[in-house]
């Protein structure tokens, strides 16, 4: 049995859908915080159990009978996130899982200037220290983030943001399909780490060019000073700590932390991963 956590989230839900195309529903189980939100999976024959990483006692029954557990990283930061991941990993091995999979990040590194990348590195280190089989899926930066970076670009013709760098933006759909392949294809080698990224890394200048092409209007990339960016965000009601955290994404991109591209995703999918153009096409069609 394959147990997937975060199955009511954006990535986890797509992973479960892709799994159900590959294996019978009675071989799939989900561990979710809210059973009602997974009711549809239950009707399809998926075993649905309540599991909350913040309540480790809930995980024994949620993971019962697991041969493999995919731990989808939580939407929290710092010690809280790492502690929750550790609880999930411990519970998975305790339940008898022969391998734990974890959705890490392409930039996982204890020295990253991007806080989530440090949390992923800490979780990976915990997996490695367990001495048990694990696979960290180092997911490319979610392409779904890009529309949030555009600001008023489509209205004003100016894509205003701090200095950035190339990012191998990767879609949830591709990451979900790849995870389902990794979980179900027994003929694959057992990798400790798999970096799953789109084939190209594009900076915001490239995004502006693509937007220009897609809309037939000129969209110009305008670089703003970091402090001016934070002030503008705060002026829009964003808490300053959140604006500063978001700024570290630009800092990391500037340093090339998200520039890696890896052929593993294409190999797993048997086709080219979706380019950022497809995400922008959807964003401009709305
Ligand atoms: N690679 C990247 O660029 C990138 C970007 C952003 C985020 N991420 C990471 O990737 C993860 C998945 O992305 P996503 O788009 O699917 O995010 P999402 O839709 O926010 O999903 C996060 C999932 O984590 C679950 N979760 C949160 N706290 C939990 C807990 N205490 N116990 C068990 N489950 C818990 C949530 O459960 P509920 O459904 O009950 O809320 C949700 O299903 C994120 O959580 C984040 O760690 C990666």
Image (cartoon, rainbow, N blue to C red):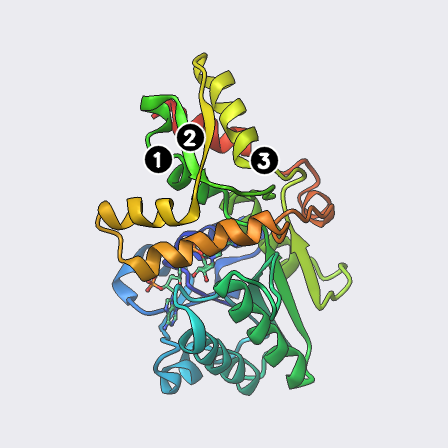
Indicate which disc, 3 or 2, sits on the residue closer to the N terminus: 2
- Spatial separation of the CA atoms under disc 1 and disc 2: 7 Å
Pick whichever, 212 or 169, lies toward us: 212
- Nearest to viewer (mark 3 / mark 2): 2
Give the numbered dot on residue 159.
2
SS for callout 3: loop
Indicate which disc, 1 or 2, sits on the residue closer to the N terminus: 1
Indicate which disc, 1 or 3, sits on the residue closer to the N terminus: 1
On screen, 197 above or below 153? below
SS for callout 1: loop
Residue 213 placed where, x, y %?
51, 17
Whether tag 1 and tag 2 are in contact, CB under 8 A, the answer is yes
Residue 159 placed where, x, y %?
42, 30
On screen, 245 above or below 201? below
Residue 284 placed where, x, y %?
40, 24
Quarter occupied by the N terminus: bottom right
Residue underneath mark 1: 151
Q: How would you rate the neighbour count of disc 2 (Cα within 10 Å): few for under 14, some for 14-19, many for 20 or more? A: many
On screen, 122 above or below 263? below
Whether tag 3 and tag 2 are in contact, CB under 8 A, the answer is no
Give the residue at x 58% y 48%.
Answer: 254
Give the numbered dot on residue 274.
3
């Amino acid at each position: 049995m394959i147990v997937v956590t975060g199955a009511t989230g954006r990535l986890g839900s797509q992973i479960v859908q892709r799994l159900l195309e590959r294996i019978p529903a009675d071989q799939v189980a989900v561990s979710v915080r809210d059973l009602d939100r997974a009711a549809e999976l239950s009707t399809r024959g998926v075993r649905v159990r309540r599991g909350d990483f913040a309540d480790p006692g809930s995980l024994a029954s949620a993971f019962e009978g697991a041969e493999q557990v995919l731990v989808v990283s939580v939407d929290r930061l710092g010690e809280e996130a790492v502690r929750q991941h550790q609880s999930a990993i411990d519970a998975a091995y305790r339940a008898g899982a022969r391998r734990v999979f974890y959705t890490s990040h392409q930039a996982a590194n204890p020295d990253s200037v991007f806080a989530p990348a440090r949390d992923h590195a800490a979780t990976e280190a915990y997996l490695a220290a367990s001495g048990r089989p694990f696979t960290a899926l180092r997911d490319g930066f979610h392409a779904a983030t890009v529309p949030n970076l555009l600001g008023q670009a489509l209205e004003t013709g100016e894509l205003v943001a701090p200095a950035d760098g190339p990012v191998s933006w990767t879609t949830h759909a591709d990451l979900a399909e790849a995870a389902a392949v990794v979980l179900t294809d027994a003929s694959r080698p057992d990798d400790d780490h798999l970096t799953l990224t789109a084939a190209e890394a594009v900076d915001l200048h490239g995004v502006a060019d693509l937007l220009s092409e897609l809309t037939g209007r000129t969209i110009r990339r305008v670089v703003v000073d970091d402090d001016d960016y934070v002030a503008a965000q705060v002026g829009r009601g964003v808490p300053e700590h959140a604006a500063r955290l978001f700024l570290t994404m630009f800092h990391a991109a500037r340093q090339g932390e998200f520039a890696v591209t890896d052929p593993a995703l294409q190999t797993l999918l048997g086709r080219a991963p979706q380019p950022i153009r497809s995400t922008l096409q959807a964003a401009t069609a709305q």
